[in-house]
Image (tube, helix red, strand yellow):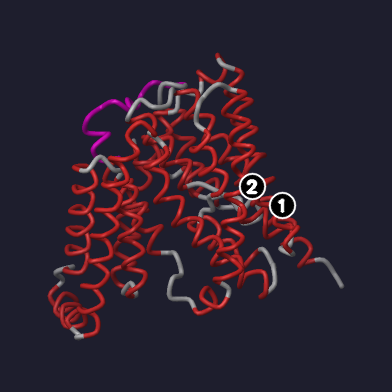
C-alpha cells in the first residue's frame, strides 16, 4: 500500500509545466490515508515510525550530497550569496516576532529559521527552466547553499529553546564527527583506496560503497539520537561531507534508488499521515498562520530586490521544503508542536513551492514566446 500510494508523487509531478516536486504528491497520499481522511495509516505505529526515521536520515543525506560545494560557480559568488543569506535572516526576525506574538505560539526563532531557509533539493533541479541568467545563478547558488546548511544546523537548536544548550553540544558533536568523516573520506579518495574498493565491489557485486555509506550514516544518526539532536542534522552534514569529497556515480545511483524508490516516499507518507488537517478546519487561526508563514517567507526573500537581485531569483530562493518538513517531523515526534501548527508549517511551505512553480511556468512561457 505504501509503494502504491507513493506513485501519486510522480503522477502529480509528471506534467513539466507544473514544476511540482514529487514529495507533494507523497505528502498528499499520506494525508488522505492518515487520520485526516481514511485513517488507514497510523503514524504512531512503531514499525512505521522506525522506517520513517531511516527514510528521514536518507532524505537529508541525499539533500546534503546534492549541495554543489565543489562547484566553482558557487565559490565565485560566495561572498554576495552569503551576504544575501545573512540579510534575509536579519529581515526575517521582524515578521517572525510579529507572527509568534500575534498567534501566541512563542516560536519566533523557529519562524525566523523557516523564513531564512532555502531548499537546495527543490531549487537546484528547477534552475534550468527558470532562465535567470548566469550572473543571477552565480549568486543564487551560494545563497541557497549557505541558507540550507545554516538553517539545517540551527533548526535543532530553535525547535526546543528550553534544551538549546544540550542541543548545541549535541549538534557540535555531530558536526565534528561529520567533518572527521570528510577528512577520512578525502584521504581514502586521494590514496586510491576508494577506487580499489569500487572495482572489487563492481566485479563481485558486493555494493561495498553503499554498505559503508549506510553504516557511517546510521552511526552518525545513532550519535545524534544519543545526544538529543535530530537525525536530520546527521544526514545533512554527512551528505555535505560526501559532496565535498565527490560522490561516486554508482553510489549516487544506489542511494537514489534506495531513497526515492521506497524509504523516502515512506517518510513523506508518514509525515502526511502525521499531519491531521482536520485540526486546521477546527482551528481557522492556524490556517491563517500557515498562509502568513508562506507569504512572509516570500516577502523577505523578495526584498533582496533592493540589493540588485532579480525578483524572480528572490522568489525562487524562498522555496522551502526540507526545513519545514524537518520542523513538522521534529515537532510532532517531540510533542513541541500540535497537529494544527505542524500542518500550518507545511501549508506555508506549499505556498512557497507554488510560487516557485508559477515562476518557472512564467519563465518557460516567456522563453517560448516568439521574438
Residue extending farthest to the right is 371
Query: Residue at label 2?
Result: 91
Residue count near mark 2 (Cα–Cα under 10 Å), binned few <14, some 14–19, many ≥20: some
Quadrant location of the C terminus in the rendered image: bottom right
Q: Nearer the viewer, residue 27 or 165?
A: 165
Residue count near mark 1 (Cα–Cα under 10 Å), binned few <14, some 14–19, many ≥20: some
Q: Earlier in the sequence, mark 2 or mark 1?
A: 2
Write the residue at 56% across / 49% down: 116
Q: Is residue 312 left or right of residue 53?
A: right
Picture quadrant where residue 157 is located: top left
Query: Residue at label 1?
Result: 303
User: Does the magenta run of residues contain 65?
Assistant: no
The magenta segment: 37-52
Write the residue at 51% across / 56% down: 147
Picture quadrant where residue 34 is located: top left
Write the residue at 34% across / 48% down: 232
Tell me residue 24's x, y (percent).
Answer: 51, 42
User: Does the magenta run of residues contain 48?
Assistant: yes
Tell me residue 238's x, y (percent).
Answer: 30, 60
Q: Is residue 363 left or right of residue 31?
A: right
Tell me residue 153's x, y (percent).
Answer: 39, 51
Amino acid at each position: 500500500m505504501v509503494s502504491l500510494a507513493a506513485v501519486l508523487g510522480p503522477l502529480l509531478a509528471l506534467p513539466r509545466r507544473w514544476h511540482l516536486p514529487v514529495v507533494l504528491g507523497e505528502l498528499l497520499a499520506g494525508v488522505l490515508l492518515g487520520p485526516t481522511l481514511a485513517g488507514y495509516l497510523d503514524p504512531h505505529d512503531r514499525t512505521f515510525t522506525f522506517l520513517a526515521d531511516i527514510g528521514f536520515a536518507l532524505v537529508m543525506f541525499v539533500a546534503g550530497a546534492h549541495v554543489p560545494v565543489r562547484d566553482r560557480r558557487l565559490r565565485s559568488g560566495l561572498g554576495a550569496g552569503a551576504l544575501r543569506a545573512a540579510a534575509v535572516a536579519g529581515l526575517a526576525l521582524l515578521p517572525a516576532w510579529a507572527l509568534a506574538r500575534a498567534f501566541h505560539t512563542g516560536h519566533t526563532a523557529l519562524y525566523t529559521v523557516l523564513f531564512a531557509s532555502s531548499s537546495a533539493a527543490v531549487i537546484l533541479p528547477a534552475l534550468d527552466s527558470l532562465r535567470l541568467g548566469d550572473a543571477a545563478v552565480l549568486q543564487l547558488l551560494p545563497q541557497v547553499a549557505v541558507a540550507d546548511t545554516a538553517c539545517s544546523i540551527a533548526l535543532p537548536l530553535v525547535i526546543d529553546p528550553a534544551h538549546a544548550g544540550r542541543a548545541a553540544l549535541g549538534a557540535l558533536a555531530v558536526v565534528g564527527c561529520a567533518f572527521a568523516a570528510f577528512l577520512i573520506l578525502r584521504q581514502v579518495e586521494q590514496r586510491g583506496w576508494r577506487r580499489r574498493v569500487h572495482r572489487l565491489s563492481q566485479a563481485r557485486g558486493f555494493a561495498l560503497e553503499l554498505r559503508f555509506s549506510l553504516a557511517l550514516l546510521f552511526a552518525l544518526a545513532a550519535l545524534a539520537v544519543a545526544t538529543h539532536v535530530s537525525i536530520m542534522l546527521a544526514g545533512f552534514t554527512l551528505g555535505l561531507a560526501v559532496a565535498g569529497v565527490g560522490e561516486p556515480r554508482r553510489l549516487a545511483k544506489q542511494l537514489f534508488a534506495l531513497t526515492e524508490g521506497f524509504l523516502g516516499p515512506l517518510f513523506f507518507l508518514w509525515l502526511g499521515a502525521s499531519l491531521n488537517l482536520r485540526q486546521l478546519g477546527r482551528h481557522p487561526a492556524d490556517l491563517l498562520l500557515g498562509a502568513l508563514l508562506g507569504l512572509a517567507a516570500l516577502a523577505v526573500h523578495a526584498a533582496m530586490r533592493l540589493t540588485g537581485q532579480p525578483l524572480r531569483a528572490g522568489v525562487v530562493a524562498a522555496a522551502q521544503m526540507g526545513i519545514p518538513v524537518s520542523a513538522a517531523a521534529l515537532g510532532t515526534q517531540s510533542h513541541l508542536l500540535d497537529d494544527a501548527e505542524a500542518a500550518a508549517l507545511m501549508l506555508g511551505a506549499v505556498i512557497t513551492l507554488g510560487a516557485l512553480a508559477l515562476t518557472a511556468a512564467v519563465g518557460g512561457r516567456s522563453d517560448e514566446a516568439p521574438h
